[in-house]
Amino acid sequence: MNDTEVRVEERIDAPPGSLYELVSDVTRMDEWSPETRSCRWLGGANGPAVGARFRGANRDGWRRWSTTCTVVAADPGRRFAFDVDFGRFPISRWTYEFAADGDGTVVTEVWHDRRRPWMVRISPVVMGVPDRPGHNREGMQQTLASLRRAAEAKRSR
């Protein structure tokens, strides 16, 4: 098992462009992600563009934390990615890729660990998560299932 990257796929009956719009509207991330409580654009940004920054507020059990994220890819209908930092420390890169599949789309969510080795060592104690890749895989599966439900409900209206 690769400890620095996790990939999860979900086929969703919606076009790539509409799924990109849902995911890249980070102010709605709390609707999909089990840990995200809110996101807001920073510094006058109001949508996805490379270099745009946003703040994410997260919660897992009693633990709460916030991160600053920077959009590193904003290719409508194809790819949306952002780097997560805690203060000046790199944490992760989250990527969403959209590939047309007949009348639907295969959405791939990728988590890439960018933490320094010392952060990886202390993380189980600080965050209470002994298996970060496994924990994230579960959350990513929940995220894509929530995205699928919302997108398919929107499409059936």
Image (spheres, rainbow, N blue to C red):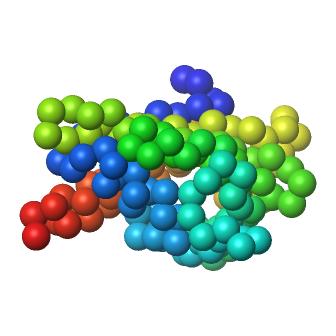
- Horizontal side of 39 relative to 122 (left or right) equals left
Q: Residue furthest left?
A: 156
Q: From the top left corner, tell me how far across and down residue 66 is, in percent.
A: 72, 69
Q: Which of 23/93 is in front?
A: 23
Q: From the top left corner, tell me how far across and down residue 107 is, in percent.
A: 35, 40
Going 57% across and 75% down the picture, which residue do you hit?
Answer: 38
Q: Which of 9/153 is in front?
A: 153
Q: Which of 58/17 is in front?
A: 17
Going 47% across and 34% down the picture, which residue do you hit?
Answer: 7
Determine which quarter of the picture holds residue 116.
top right
Can residue 93 be seen from the camera position used here?
yes
Question: In the displayed structure, would residue 143 be above or below residue 133?
Answer: below
Can residue 123 be seen from the camera position used here?
no
Going 10% across and 64% down the picture, which residue do you hit?
Answer: 156
Question: In the displayed structure, would residue 141 be above or below residue 21?
Answer: above
Total marks placed: 0
Q: From the top left corner, tell me how far across and down residue 12 is, in percent.
A: 23, 46
Determine which quarter of the picture holds residue 1.
top right
- Horizontal side of 130 relative to 23 (left or right) equals right
Determine which quarter of the picture holds residue 32.
bottom left
Question: In the displayed structure, would residue 130 be above or below residue 25?
Answer: above
> Which quarter of the figure is the C terminus placed in?
bottom left
- Horizontal side of 7 relative to 148 (left or right) equals right
Question: In the displayed structure, would residue 1 be above or below residue 61?
Answer: above
- Horizontal side of 35 relative to 64 (left or right) equals left
Q: From the top left corner, tell me how far across and down residue 8 is, in percent.
A: 41, 37
